[in-house]
Amino acid sequence: MVDATHDAEGRHTNEREADLVLEQVLPAEPRAWRRVKAGLLVELGRADRKVAARWQEAVVGGRFDADRAADELLASARDGEAEAAVERRSAELARDLVMAPRMRGLHGAARKAREAGRRGLAWLLVQVLVVLVFLLAFVGSLLAARYAGHDVHAPLDTVLDWVGLEPGGGRG
């Protein structure tokens, strides 16, 4: 349907205008993306090692040219899986960059404080559980000894004496 709001392909003219603007503004592979992609290839070990080492030396020597480095590194990609690896790593990098503002400043400090509080509470709970397990084991062993016909007063008096409490101090 061709009318004032649709083109020959049936798309809304606003969509077509937006596509034309994007095609003009964004070249097939922007310069910045080529640079980042080349760096990712080096990071992931998918670029030729000699080419990567040469450009690393150029960085140290102050002779680094980002566009030339990107051209050579992209041309030296070693395998067919490089593109998939770059896609995965770029997704991780995008996630990290999106979360970066929340990881620093007030939000980051508050997050770290909450995590520390949770870790502290978890540590305290573990300690309480350990003490309770040992207490239950001790009481269980006393009950088992008592039902087996053993007198548990003398061993308990010895433990209380070690702790500094006098056995039978409350009797009168």
Image: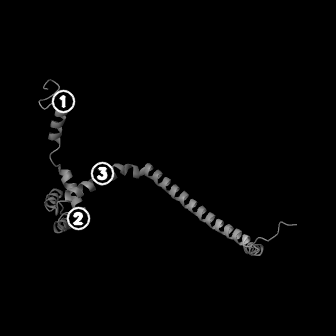
Other-residue count near label 1 (Cα within 10 Å), few / some / many at <14 / 14–19 / ≥20 = some
Q: Quadrant of residue 16?
A: top left
- The disc placed on residue 98 is none
- Residue occupied by mark 2: 45
Q: Quadrant of residue 125?
A: bottom right
**x and y percent of residue 118 in the render?**
51, 55
Q: Quadrant of the C terminus?
A: bottom right
**x and y percent of residue 4 in the render?**
15, 23
Q: Is residue 112 left or right of residue 128?
A: left
Other-residue count near label 2 (Cα within 10 Å), few / some / many at <14 / 14–19 / ≥20 = some
Q: CA distance from mark 2 to mark 1?
A: 45 Å
Question: Are the residues tagged 2 and 1 within 8 Å (C-beta)?
Answer: no
Q: Amino acid at mark 2?
A: Gly
- Residue occupied by mark 1: 12
- Residue occupied by mark 3: 94
Q: Earlier in the sequence, mark 3 or mark 2?
A: 2
**x and y percent of residue 107 in the render?**
44, 49
